[in-house]
Amino acid sequence: MKKFYNRNFAYGAAALLIGAVSFTACSSEDELSNTNPTYDGESVKTQFAINIPAAAKTRMTGEYTQQDGNFLGMKDIKLIPFASMPALGTESNLGSVITLGNISDNLSATSNAKVYNDVAIPVGTGAVILYGQANKEAGTNFNKGAVTMPSDYSVLSNIKFSPVNITTNETDAKATALAAWMTSVANAEGWDAAGEGTLKDLRDEFLKTTVGSSNSVLCLMQYLYNALAKEDGAEATAIKAAIKAGNGVVESDGKLSYGEGSSLAGYPENINLPDGAAQVVWNSTKFDVVAASGNTGINVASLDSYVYPAALCYYVNSKVKTADTEVDMDAASDWTAIVGSMTGSSVAPTTRSIAIEQPINYGVGRLSTQVKFGAQRVPDSKDDGHNSSVVEIPGEGFKITGILIGGQGEVGWNYIPTATTTGSKTIYDKSMTEGMCAKYSSDFTGAITNYTLAFETESNKDVNVAIELVNGDKDFYGKDGMIIPAGGKFYLVGQLESSAATETGEKIFKQDYNTIAKFNITNLKSAYNGLPDLRTPSLQLGMSVDLNWEKGHTFDVEIK
């Protein structure tokens, strides 16, 4: 996901002002002389202005998360009035939920106030909750994030915000076709009866395969085809024939590829999932597609557990300040002074101006990720202390094509996990910052940072993060001796330990906080060729993680 700068994470000292309606004051000398003429016995109508710091409109790598100070506008804005600040979620609101119009991203360079006219605010209002999300329509859900918003805001305890599933758990036809191709190769005539030697070793290795994506299977078939190049027996000939018999498979000068219209190409990209989510298992006579967690005994998440990154959401639960006089909207550049000049704490029949005391914050957290190798040459799983087997890290590094974050689930009215939150969802962020890769370096200076939005997680709960990388031009061996073929994708898992998150109440992700994770890869022995279920507590970890936390800073803007 393309994302936001830590200076701006608490975007903004976005306070709210309800300014005065222009009118001629009553001149009678009775006690009602100062009553707002719009008072109808229940509410007063005022101007309502949201104060949002003017920001640069530069569109760079942080576009969709306001990484670069670019305000994206706001939509789905709901204002809920209360007598006092809600704390438990059981409090009743005053009157109806107020829907405010969208705010565009083209704020004036000299003003940071969005003014709404004739907004009716109930008398007795002493606090408000405001919800909204970034007004970004262009781009995919991977770019801008996604969230299931509440359909009804009238009952606070019923308000829930949920991550959005990328796909269902149904088995795709391409997955079935790929498993059938793998089965036909595994059952090539004579291969199962091969005695000790190259052919038997290759078959044992092939049957351990658990990844069923189009790219990974093709890379595996290429590895096998290359290994059989010098074999000319009947079994080797049958295996090579089975490989080339795959639907639409083309062989040219020893190089395999999918031809146009191949039923084997494009999975699971066609359902927007990472390569490693497509998994298979050998079942004594054939390869079966693994679509659901727990049905085969291998460590894999169900396809419907993958979700888009969270959308950029806004939230504030705050007391209000009131005044019985008109507030000068031209003074909006000094919001502290405006709020400080207002001495009331509850809306009355005489109220002309109202301000939300606290700034608007983000309702989501953010992960800032950097990755590097700790050495120029790192061991793979064939390096056992007696036999050396190392992988040379190329100068350009290994390309990073995705980041996966476990522990996600719904949050409640206050953007905090509910009592029923399971944390069973995994974010798949495939919209990487340009040039994102893992190179060898002694430190993280110059490392490219990727940004991902996530919902707040539960206290005292560790979160597993997987980095999706592309192997270069040489095969190596990962976890359990699995072959990671050249050109194939692989995954390294790091754990973010909640005990380190002292600033956030031992929560890995917290609304309005930036979690910075620096992943240092020390070896490739723990590289997975298939994506493991990130809920599993006993995953083999292949990276050390340096965590630190930064509170979102207010983006201060001088309005001239």
Image: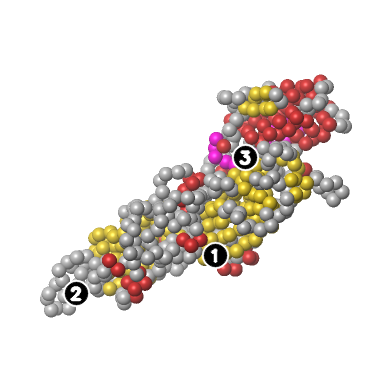
Task: Look at label 1 and name its amino acid.
Answer: Glu
- Residue, disc 1: 550
Q: Nearer the viewer, residue 193 or 67?
A: 67
Tag 2 residue: 34
Q: Nearer the viewer, mark 2 or mark 1?
A: 1
- Which class describes the residues within 10 Å of circle 1: few (<14), some (14-19), or many (20+)? some
Can residue 173 be seen here?
Answer: yes
As helix, strand or loop, the secondary structure at mark 2 comes to loop
User: In whole angstroms, how far apart are the C-alphas of marks 2 and 3?
Assistant: 68 Å
- From the viewer's perspective, tell me whether residue 12 is left or right of residue 35: right
Relative to 160, residue 274 above or below = above
User: Is residue 491 positioned above or below 26 on the image?
Assistant: above
Task: Tell me which corner region of the image, top left, top right, bottom left or bottom right, holds residue 109.
Answer: bottom left
The colour scheme of the drawn protein is secondary structure
Q: Position of residue 465 (x, y in %)?
A: 62, 53
Query: Magenta stretch: residue 277 in it?
Result: yes
For this view, does 193 lie left or right of residue 12?
right
Query: Which residue sits at x=63%, y=65%?
Result: 500
Q: Residue at x 68, y 41 (%)?
A: 471
Q: Quadrant of the C terminus?
A: bottom left
Query: Which residue lies under the disc numbered 3?
Result: 275
Segment colored magenta: 270-287
Q: Name the residue furthest left.
A: 28
